[in-house]
Image (spheres, helix red, strand yellow):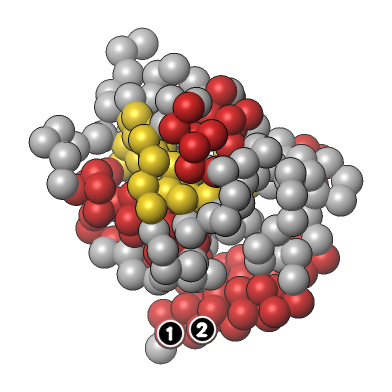
Amino acid sequence: MKYPQIKVIIPAVNEEDSISKVIAEIPNIVSEIIVVNNNSTDNTAQVAKKSGATVLLEQNKGYGYACLKGLEYIANQETLPDIVVFLDGDYSDYPQEMINILDPILKKDIDFVVGARVSEYREKGSMTFPQRFGNWLATFLMRILFKSTFTDLGPFRAIKYDKLVLLNMEDKTYGWTVEMQLKALRHKLTYTEIPVHYKKRIGVSKVSGTIKGAIFAGIKILSWIFKYSF
């Protein structure tokens, strides 16, 4: 199969122990791997660059800030990609499963694909209770309010670049993933989920690993859902 141009954006905060493993397992069909160093205090940037990634710096802390920095970089390139993949830098995902996530776009012309961290593919302890409950509550509300079929807010996802631009993403912190899914529903994008494996991350989560992070993530996710329900 002849692959279109695919770019990967990886937000990363203090992931020097994991980022090289993530980059090494990304399939070679990808044209560019963009690691956005979200003001790390370790050697994340140096390790990512040595591993072959393009490294950007985003000093404002926040998952959305990092993703928006990656998109700003892409938008200023002479040749725009066909597909953008988002992937975490903590090695909790299996980067080689990117092929499976891309398949619905490449073979069925689907606009947007989310990697769903289904229970049978999850390593025990890989998702905390706040993560599991937050995913259940958010997707339950999305089913009730928007008739969606999403079951997860998983960060491992792929979307056609022109559709991503259409969404006009804006969230700068914890609401990035749910914003994308809500806007995909509003714009009537075609979408699907692909089951993916999920393992314990390397290092401590910046969101679910702290009480503050879990609370703020929950508030932000629910605020996006209720914003779109009225």
- Residue at x 73%, y 45% (from the top left corner): 201
- Residue name at image x 16 percent, y 46 percent: 76
In this view, the residue in front, 11 or 6, is 11
Question: Looking at the image, is 201 positioned above or below residue 39?
Answer: above
**What amino acid is labelled 2 in the image?**
Ser
Question: Split into 4 quadrants, where in the image is the N terminus?
Answer: top left
Q: Residues within 10 Å of mark 2 (few under 14, many from 20)?
A: some
To which residue does mark 2 refer? 223
Q: Looking at the image, which residue is at 50% across and 78% down?
A: 225
Residue 102 point in image, percent of width and height: 45, 31
Image point 42% across, 68% down: which residue? 60
* Direction from residue 61 to residue 106 in the image, left or right: left
Q: Is residue 78 left or right of residue 36?
A: left
**The quarter of the displayed image where residue 209 is located:** bottom right
Kindly state the secondary structure of the residue where label 2 is placed: helix
The location of residue 49, given as percent across then percent down, is 44, 32
Q: Secondary structure at mark 1?
A: helix
The reply to whether callout 2 and callout 1 are in contact (CB within 8 Å) is yes
Q: CA distance from mark 2 to mark 1?
A: 6 Å
Residue 55 locus on image (x, y percent): 39, 41
- Please say if 74 is above or below 97: below
Can you see residue 163? no
Question: Can residue 207 be seen at all in this image of the molecule?
Answer: yes
Q: Residues within 10 Å of mark 1 (few under 14, many from 20)?
A: few
Circle 1: residue type: Lys
Please name whichever residue, 6 or 121, is drawn nearer the observer in this view of the structure. Answer: 6
Q: Which residue is mark 1?
A: 227
- Give how far across and how far down residue 127 sits, in percent: 78, 55
